[in-house]
Amino acid sequence: MAIKLNCDLGEGSDKVDAAVMPFIDQASIACGFHAGDPLHISSTLALAQSEGVSVGAHPSYRDREGFGRRSMACSQQEIIALMHYQIAALEGMARCQGLLVDYVKPHGALYNDMMAQAPVRAAVMMAIACFYRPLPLMLLATAEAPLHRMEADEHGIKLLFEGFADRGYDDNGQLLSRTQPNAVLGREAMLNQVRQLRSQGTVTTAGGASLALQIDSLCVHGDNPTAAAAIGDIRSLLEA
């Protein structure tokens, strides 16, 4: 099972971006609404270009104070507009460096709401479907993947399914809330989860169940120092 490695970057630390970039395949870059600014976006794009890393847009709700982790009541039109604004900004800066945005991965609460609420997911898919050119949507691999594929087909978009190296799962295949124990994994638990995904295609949930996941890409959070420090070991495990 060939699995790519992605990381959420451009969120405030040039040091982390530089340390992580040589090990990953895909960089999901903050577009300014939850983190990032024009200078940081530019420097992160330059790092991605130097390492031959694919660039993704990482849009969020407009929530810098809460790092994009607070749900917001937005209409379908608002979600489409905020996504287009952010994707277009990153796309424009990428084009200035000879790059293209290759995919879209929502951030934080927008990502969680997309997975939990069909109307939010529909709005996100509509935003991507009516962007000026086709872009894949990255979302969480769950048991509902067949439904999500059907929804994506209706909108004429492609999906990339992702798993998480550094986050715990509940028995339904959703990420544990960060308010719960073991929502963010320590180093050994994280590496064990990567080994299990690589060798068996499963994760062990908080309730002890074995959950099968078919993923295209594995995420490491750039704002998680433990995960960022283990990126080389994670890369080695995926290539074992």
Image (cartoon, helix red, strand yellow):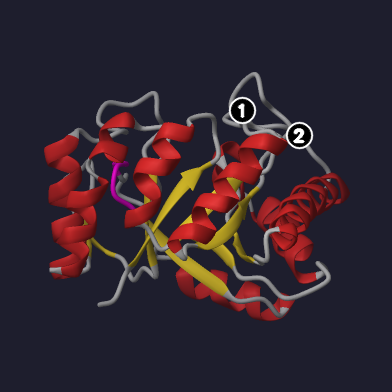
Is 154 placed above or below 87 here?
Answer: below
Helix, strand or loop: magenta stretch = loop
The residue under the point 12% across, 68% down is: 240
Q: How many marks?
A: 2
The residue carrying pointer 1 sits among few (fewer than 14), some (14 to 19) or many (20 or more) residues within 10 Å by Cα, namely some
Q: Secondary structure at mark 2?
A: loop
Q: Is residue 150 above or below residue 41?
A: below
| Coordinates of residue 153 in the picture (x, y in percent) | 65, 80
Q: Are marks 1 and 2 in contact (CB under 8 Å)?
A: no
Q: Nearer the viewer, mark 1 or mark 2?
A: 1
Which residue is rendered at x = 78% and y = 50% of the image?
89
Looking at the image, residue 129 lies above or below residue 203: below
Q: Specify the amino acid type for callout 2.
A: Ala
Residue holding disc 1: 70
Crowding around mark 2 (Cα neighbors within 10 Å: few <14, some 14 to 19, many 20+) is few
In this view, the residue in front, 40 or 79, is 40
Q: Is residue 61 left or right of residue 208?
A: right
- Segment colored magenta: 164-168
Under circle 1, the secondary element is: loop
Percent across and percent down for residue 127 are 78, 60
**The disc label shown at residue 22, or none:** none
Where is residue 100? Give x, y as percent.
Answer: 66, 67
Q: Position of residue 158 (x, y in %)?
A: 60, 76
Q: Is residue 167 magenta?
A: yes
Q: Residue at x 76, y 70 (%)?
A: 129
Q: Which residue is mark 2?
A: 73
| Amino acid type, label 1 | Arg
In reply to whether residue 202 is colored magenta, the answer given is no
Label 1, label 2: how far apart the Cα atoms are = 10 Å
Quadrant of the image occupied by residue 134: bottom right
**Is residue 116 visible in this depiction of the protein?**
no
- Name the quarter where the N terminus is drawn: bottom left
